[in-house]
Amino acid sequence: MRKKTKNRHGGFGLQVLMLLFMLLVGANGTHAQSDCFEYEENVIIGLTETGMAASSLTIPATVTTVNSGAFSAAAKVSTLIIEAGGNPTFEGKLFGDDKTNPISDIQILGNSMTVANIQKLFTSLGAQGELTTVYIAGYSGEWSDIASNAVLTSDVTVTLPAALVSTQQFGDAKVYGRFEITKEIISFCGNATFQDTDDGSNMLFYIADECNKKDGYIHIKRVSYVKKGEGVLIHNLTGTSYSADLPVYDGEITGDDATNYVKNMLKGVTTATTIGKTDGDKTNLVLKNGAFHPTSGGTIGANKAYLQVPTTALAAREMLNISFEDETSGIRESNLPPGGSQPPVWRGASGYDLSGRLLNSRPSAKGLYIYNGKKYVIR
């Protein structure tokens, strides 16, 4: 009995040791490239052999400081990623005094990195080196301290979420705003002007041009520039989530766009703003499920837009649907018999009925429907 008990305990102990070993190995693998760095507590002081040979290095969110010269032994690193939630301070030159910065791509994820530490990161890279692209997903504070940073030259492209881009530049860098849309129609208002350089087949921008009390539609017009401080609608034609990076434009808007913005009935806000049910002789409406609905008042989120129309144009309507204007021939009305040919590429969640309800598939009931800005009648 004693021998049997002893063996059983010995086997159990071995299993525990093996389990602990597996947990330690697994834990090491879950830390973001923790095997690439040499640490003193939460300070990166250098690179391991793995880090020296890596082409991409991810600094964990737990890191508080990266010492001067910590990457001096890097052999071929080209991408530096700051993990979401991280806000490390960079002390001195990252690659030391005698080595050119080989990093071409910086990605700052999340929104925890302060402007001061972002600036220290740019400064720590020393000479311009190979840096060409920077993506910053979020930030804390203002960009004024970075504007005069000479490290960012005209060879560098900085991309921010469109809502974060202001007229403040990053030295001579080219600045882009990343527009991301997961719904078919959203509203937007920004702190900078963007030029729509997308090919136009996936994401289109519109202003509200006219409210017709006879047909219950808000008519809109396409614009090629997303003007600073103006509300616009973004129409996603893909049927799925889509993003595009558009450059900041600092020139004068002329031509049709200039005329369209004069008549724009979309009111944009760049900070969370309280709006009432009415404003003088105007009624305020908010975008919901692809249509504009009168509001009883409340707060509209930052970087969004609401619709303001003459109260007399609303009559007793509960909503205003959106009539996407075809640039060449106006709104086209097409017959769509049940069981017949459907609109080109009818994707899920791309159409609406006249109540503003989103349709996940081609309808079969008789009626009038809106698909990609065109009216289709099922008889």
Image (cartoon, rainbow, N blue to C red):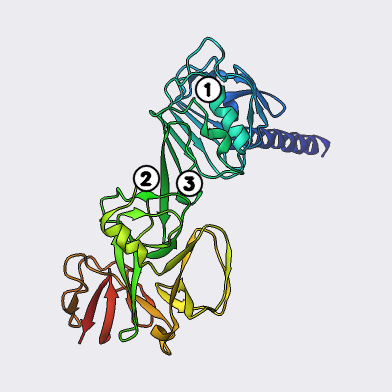
Question: Taking 65 as reference, is 110 left or right?
Answer: left
* Residue 338 screen position, x and y as percent: 20, 83
Element at label 2: loop
The C terminus lies in quadrant: bottom left
Marks 2 and 1, the one that precedes in the sequence: 1
Up/down of 183 relative to 161, above or below: below
Q: Amino acid at mark 3?
A: Val
Q: Disc number at residue 249?
A: 2
The residues bearing labels 3 and 1 have C-alpha atoms spaced at a distance of 23 Å
Residue at the extreme top of the image, as rendered: 98
Q: Nearer the viewer, residue 178 or 273?
A: 273
Q: Please name the residue that numbered disc 3 is placed on.
A: 165
Tell me the quarter of the image containing the N terminus: top right
Depicted 372 relative to depicted 250: above or below: below
Residue drawn at point x = 58 percent, y = 18 percent: 93
The answer to the question of whether label 2 and label 1 lie on touching residues, with beta carbons closer than 8 A, is no
Gap between marks 2 and 3 measured at Cα = 11 Å
Residue at screen point 57% across, 43% down: 139
Residue 237 in sight in this render:
no
Residue found at the very far bottom of the displayed protein: 316
Q: Secondary structure at mark 3?
A: loop
Q: Residues within 10 Å of mark 2 (few under 14, many from 20)?
A: some
**What's the amino acid at mark 1?**
Leu
Does 190 sit above or below residue 65? Answer: below
5 vs 27, left or right, is: right
For the residues labelled 2 and 1, the Cα–Cα distance comes to 28 Å
Does residue 9 appear anywhere in the picture? yes
Q: Nearer the viewer, mark 3 or mark 1?
A: 3
